[in-house]
Image (cartoon, helix red, strand yellow):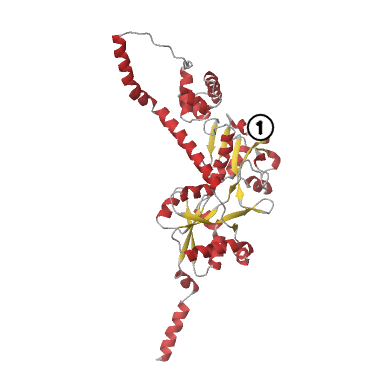
């Protein structure tokens, strides 16, 4: 009888493998922004998962890919405990969900040092004669996405400060998506005049032998001197490692301690950890940029909506006034007082182009819609700027409205 019980116990012990033991551990889920797709995100952050699994054996860590569109829903439904994303996206999410930063990322730079901040690089092909930000007026500009923080928004702010609206003052603003190398390829082959990329990319491509440093002109590089990479913008803090409210404090503190200890931990090298982590830094500069960018996008959208619906608005607002004026004229005719600030006379073509400019279309898009050349569009745009005494397309639309 005793031998039977011993045999059963031995079978049970053999069946209790480490994998099954891990299945019984509490799971901590880390949401990671999958800007290059799910497979890339899982591979990119696998070292982090391995490191945390080894550092905190009482927990099992799982990577959950997020997108810019899905992250808020995944957080609200309780699918993640921690969030790893770019600083601009973090600011958006933290306005909707209670979360706090427990560590900030530090990335190895082209000279081997580590930095906890980054920016954008704005560049042109060396033989184009483009040297300043204002040279982007009437040119084709390539970037990643209008919601990309380091791939567009940080550079957008510098153009705004230079008095140039990338959405209305360029011939075409092209968002090419990932990989970011495509922006560089477009500028190198002349398909775009100016490119915007996250800092550090050009240095990597040059080191890999794809380009030479002299192939390009780098704009506004006096924005900062305290960074090893070429930078055209202000510096902003690197990606935050955020924890959601309600996560067990012991788990939260253990993860924070493990991250901050990674720099001196042998486990980090064994786990092939790609980044090191520092104490959390302030993200106020990111918040300010995010607020300014949101206001600009909303204002641009409002102008476009108003311009598209102007016939209805004019009819709704002016019809009662016109009827009243007609009645008064019948009772006592009187000459109209001439306007002190008459609007300039426009040709039919100029009216068409002005309307499309107000809707946010680029010169190339206007040319395609009207069946004319981009040079013709630019000729009429120049006439419109002169007639309204405007210095930019955005000012032109405001004066015409």
User: Up-down: is 55 above or below 85?
Assistant: below
Whether residue 186 is visible here, answered yes or no, is no
- Assign the N terminus to one quadrant of the image: bottom left
- Residue at 44 percent across and 87 percent down: it is 6
Q: Tell me where residue 129 sits by quadrant.
A: top right
Residue 128 location, quadrant: top right
Q: Residue at x 50, y 73 (%)?
A: 18
Question: Residue 73, how many percent across, how many down?
Answer: 41, 52
* Nearest the eye: 324 or 33: 324
Callout 1: SS: helix
Q: Is residue 189 above or below residue 269?
A: above
* Viewer-closest of 120 and 378: 120
Q: How many marks?
A: 1
Crowd rating for badge 1 (residues with CA inside 10 Å; few <14, some 14–19, many 20+): few
Residue at the spot 58% in from the left edge and 30% down from the top edge = 137
**Residue underneath mark 1:** 128
Q: Position of residue 198 (x, y in %)?
A: 59, 45
User: Can I make out residue 197 in this image?
Assistant: yes
């Amino acid at each position: 009888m005793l031998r039977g019980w011993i045999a059963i116990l031995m079978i049970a012990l053999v069946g209790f493998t480490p994998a099954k033991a891990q299945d019984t551990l509490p799971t901590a889920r880390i949401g990671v922004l999958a800007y290059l797709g799910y497979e890339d995100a899982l591979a990119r952050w696998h070292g982090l998962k391995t490191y945390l699994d080894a550092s905190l054996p009482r927990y099992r860590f799982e990577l959950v890919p997020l997108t810019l569109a899905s992250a808020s829903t995944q957080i609200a439904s309780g699918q993640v405990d921690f969030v790893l994303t770019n600083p601009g996206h973090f600011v958006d999410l933290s306005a909707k969900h209670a979360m706090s930063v427990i560590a900030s990322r530090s990335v190895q730079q082209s000279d081997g040092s580590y930095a906890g901040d980054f920016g954008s690089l704005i560049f042109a092909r060396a033989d184009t004669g483009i040297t300043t930000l204002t040279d982007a007026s009437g040119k084709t500009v390539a970037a990643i996405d209008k919601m990309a923080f380091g791939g567009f928004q940080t550079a957008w702010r510098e153009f705004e400060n230079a008095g140039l609206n990338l959405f209305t003052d360029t011939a075409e603003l092209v968002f090419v998506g990932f990989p970011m190398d495509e922006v560089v390829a477009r500028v190198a082959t002349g398909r775009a005049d100016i490119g915007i990329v996250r800092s550090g990319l050009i240095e990597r491509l040059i080191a890999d032998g794809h380009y030479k440093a002299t192939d390009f002109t780098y704009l506004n590089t006096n924005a900062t001197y305290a960074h090893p990479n070429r930078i055209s913008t202000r510096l902003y803090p690197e990606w935050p490692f955020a924890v959601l409210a309600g996560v067990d404090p012991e788990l939260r503190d253990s993860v924070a301690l493990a991250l901050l200890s990674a720099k001196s931990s042998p486990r980090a090298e064994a786990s092939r950890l790609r980044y090191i982590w520092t104490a959390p830094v302030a993200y106020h500069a990111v918040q300010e940029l995010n607020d300014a960018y949101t206001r600009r996008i909303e204002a641009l959208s409002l102008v476009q909506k108003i311009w598209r619906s102007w016939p209805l608005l004019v009819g709704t607002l002016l019809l009662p006034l016109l009827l009243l004026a007609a009645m008064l004229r019948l009772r006592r005719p009187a000459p109209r007082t001439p306007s002190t600030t008459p609007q300039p006379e426009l040709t039919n073509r100029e009216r068409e182009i002005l309307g499309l400019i107000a809707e946010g279309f680029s010169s190339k898009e206007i040319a395609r819609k009207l069946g004319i050349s981009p040079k013709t569009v630019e000729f009429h745009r120049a006439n419109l700027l002169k007639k309204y005494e405007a210095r930019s397309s955005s000012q032109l639309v405001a004066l015409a409205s």
